[in-house]
């Protein structure tokens, strides 16, 4: 789909109501993927991402910091427009506001991504958790350690959300669309992601618990910090730190420690 449906956020109540009909499409063999059906899935996924306690906690921390800054500004400048009461009222209903904002921008971004429905084998059903929307970049180790948080801007980002034990939504920038049957090993890898993303609880359809869900995995040998460029950068950082040990302020600093081009780090 190349076009954004008009007034996507205005169609939210109707779209979420229709979501209950989505999981039966593959069972009936009817690949209904029109604009409204696609919007329904994207809106539901955005709402489920925003409604989790873990996501709300991040938003609450940010909102409290804003409130603190506004209160401080009002105390130091009487001429400033009084906004603290308005912000306090906003924070009282913070979670509904978070869901509303997510439906306004996140659902639209989801709509621009490629969408697929993953189908798990009967022997390896999907699990879910109190954080059902999972953001994962399976290629994150190719990035610098400080940039490994999952981001929508990353080309390898994968967003999954189990809808039933048999079906899971997948949003990505990759050429993965339509219905995709998974092997048992592939389904369990998505379950491992779900288990590690859980805040406090995860849910297994029949109460089964598998040890692979708790496997943190092994970092690949070719991860970014093992590259020659990264090792040179680490050596340069250690050398710079050594110059300033014990509060010392060096009179001169070798240019090789400041110019990354000399170290082949660009």
Image (spheres, rainbow, N blue to C red):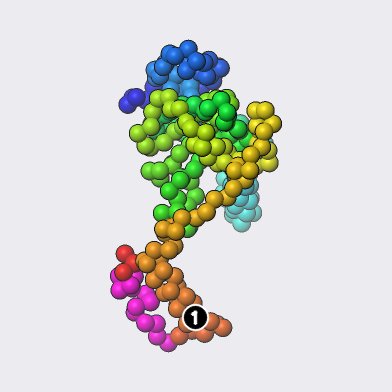
* Residue range of the region highlighted in magenta in the rendering: 251-263
Neighbour class for label 1 at 10 Å: few (<14), some, many (≥20)?
few
Residue 128 horizontal side relative to residue 253, left or right: right
Question: Which residue, as the protein is rendered here, is positioned at the far bottom?
Answer: 251
Q: Nearer the viewer, residue 71 or 61?
A: 61
Q: Nearer the viewer, residue 181 or 38?
A: 181
Q: Quadrant of the N terminus?
A: top left
Which percent across, then down, holds residue 172?
Answer: 41, 36
Which percent across, then down, holds residue 31?
Answer: 41, 17
* Residue at which label 1 appears: 242
Residue 88 makes an appearance in the image = no
Which percent across, then down, holds residue 151?
Answer: 46, 45
The tally of labels here is 1
Judged from the image, the secondary structure of the residue bearing numbered disc 1 is helix
**Residue in view at x 38 percent, y 28 percent:** 177
Residue 143 horizontal side relative to residue 82, left or right: left
36 lies above or below 198: above
12 lies above or below 223: above
Residue 30 makes an appearance in the image = yes
Q: Nearer the viewer, residue 9 or 107?
A: 107
Q: Quadrant of the C terminus?
A: bottom left
**Residue in view at x 36 percent, y 66 percent:** 229
Q: Nearer the viewer, residue 123 or 3?
A: 123
* The magenta stretch spans residue 256: yes
Which percent across, then down, holds residue 22?
Answer: 51, 18
**Residue in view at x 50 percent, y 55 percent:** 219
* The magenta stretch spans residue 155: no
């Amino acid at each position: 789909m190349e076009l954004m449906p008009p007034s996507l956020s205005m169609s939210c109540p109707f779209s979420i109501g229709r979501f209950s009909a989505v999981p039966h499409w593959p069972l009936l063999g009817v690949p209904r993927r029109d604009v409204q059906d696609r919007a329904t899935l994207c809106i539901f996924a955005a709402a489920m991402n925003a409604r989790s306690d873990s996501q709300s906690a991040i938003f609450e921390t940010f909102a409290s910091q804003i409130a603190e800054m506004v209160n401080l500004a009002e105390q130091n400048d009487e001429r400033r427009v009084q906004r603290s009461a308005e912000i306090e009222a906003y924070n009282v209903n913070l979670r509904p506001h978070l869901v509303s904002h997510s439906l306004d921008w996140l659902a639209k971004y989801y709509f621009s991504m490629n969408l697929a429905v993953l189908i798990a084998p009967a022997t390896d059903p999907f699990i879910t958790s109190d954080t059902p929307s999972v953001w994962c970049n399976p290629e994150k180790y190719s990035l610098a350690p400080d940039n490994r948080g999952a981001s929508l801007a990353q080309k390898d980002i994968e967003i999954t959300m189990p809808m039933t034990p048999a079906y899971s939504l997948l949003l990505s920038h990759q050429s993965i669309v339509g219905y995709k049957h998974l092997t048992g090993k592939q389904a369990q890898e998505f379950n491992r992601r779900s288990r590690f993303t859980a805040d406090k609880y995860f849910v297994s359809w029949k109460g089964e618990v598998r040890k692979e869900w708790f496997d943190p995995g092994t970092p690949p040998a070719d991860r970014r910090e093992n590259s020659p460029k990264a090792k040179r950068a680490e050596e340069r950082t250690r050398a710079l730190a050594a110059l300033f040990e014990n509060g010392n302020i060096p009179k001169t600093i070798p240019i090789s420690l400041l110019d990354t081009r000399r170290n082949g780090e660009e």
